[in-house]
Amino acid sequence: MASVPAYVRDALTPGMYEVLDHQLARAAERRGVDSAPGGDRSARLAVMRADYRAERSFWNEGGPQMASTYDGHVHAAGVDVPIRIYRPTAAESLPAIAYFHGGGFNVGDLDTHDRIMRVLADKSGAAVVGVDYTLSPEARFPQALHECAGVVAHLAAEGQRYGIEPSRLVVAGDSAGSMLSMGTVLLLRDGPAEAGLRADAAAAAFASIRGMLLYYGGHGLRDSATSRLYGGFWDGMGKRELGDVDAFHFNDAAERSSPYIDHLSADLSRDLPAAFIVGAELDPLADDGRALAAMLARNGREVDFRMVPGVLHSFLHFGRMLDEANEELARGAEFARAHL
């Protein structure tokens, strides 16, 4: 813990401090406390994926039990996209939250975010549909976005097949999943043909989305105070890790200017669902969430924004030890319940 900058270490809540101490101790057991392994990006990625799954397995233990869980596939953007539907009750028909996991577009899956999705389902009373989009670099931008939009369009058209009310949907995600959630809404509104979707199907899907739950996402800032102050080996948000995200996910630098990535450059003045936005104070992406919330509010959109003091990026995962994770998931679930 001594190698974490004092201005970060001293600002942590007691619970976040305990979580980080635990994380760094487990990292030291695996390969040394400092950071991800060196070497080329491909070699690092293989280790990162294995470590991420192993590390998240601890945090996914416990939590609420579901009435049922269903694993299946939805054909979208030319591929069969795995989905997992968490049903908190045995009700025949439920509204749904489509959840897109985080992980910098290059790590993560349905298992790594299992507890987050179970908590959202339990607290909201809605089914949660986890979407296991194709990771980068196996599929670069905009493939994951097109898959997510396709799954939402499918739920809006065929939700009854899964016991889901197709006109009552919320999109949600953390980190990269937050970016995909906002990007999906904008794509369905402005550019469905790019994802191979019919205009009428996309319009119906867009109309079905009652809200967005956006947890600590990046939304287009190229520079900010928080991006300069925060992020490092301790939270996987250092310059090298963020450089890997860009190198793996984008075909070229120009793609970062897409309005489906740079949400702050999109038209935020019309036809957007209510937004629940949560930032982590000690996160390099904190200013992105703050900026998006301010711009949506300025354009008359409904926004519920909170910056959680003393926590790091990815804090939602740590519900076993961190009260703030459970509190913000519960607040997001209540927002979803109120809008569904």
Image: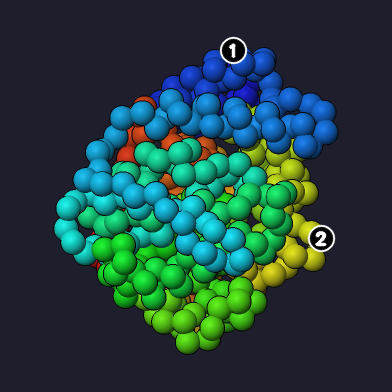
Question: Of the residues shown, which amino acid type is indicated by label 2?
Answer: Asp
Left or right: 130 with respect to 337?
right
Secondary structure type for disc 1: helix
Question: Looking at the image, which residue sits at the far top?
Answer: 29
Q: Position of residue 71 (x, y in %)?
A: 39, 49
Q: Mark 1: few, some, or many residues within 10 Å (few <14, many ≥20)?
A: few
Task: Please state if 86 lies on the left or on the right of 206 as rendered.
Answer: left
Residue to which mark 2 is pinned: 252
Give coordinates of residue 318: x percent, y percent.
42, 33
Which residue is tagged 1? 29
Residue 304 appears in the picture as rendered: no
Snapshot quadrant of residue 111: top left
Q: Is residue 95 above or below residue 178?
A: below
Q: Is residue 269 above or below residue 17?
A: below
Q: Earlier in the sequence, mark 2 or mark 1?
A: 1
Q: Give the residue type that dot 1 points to.
A: Glu
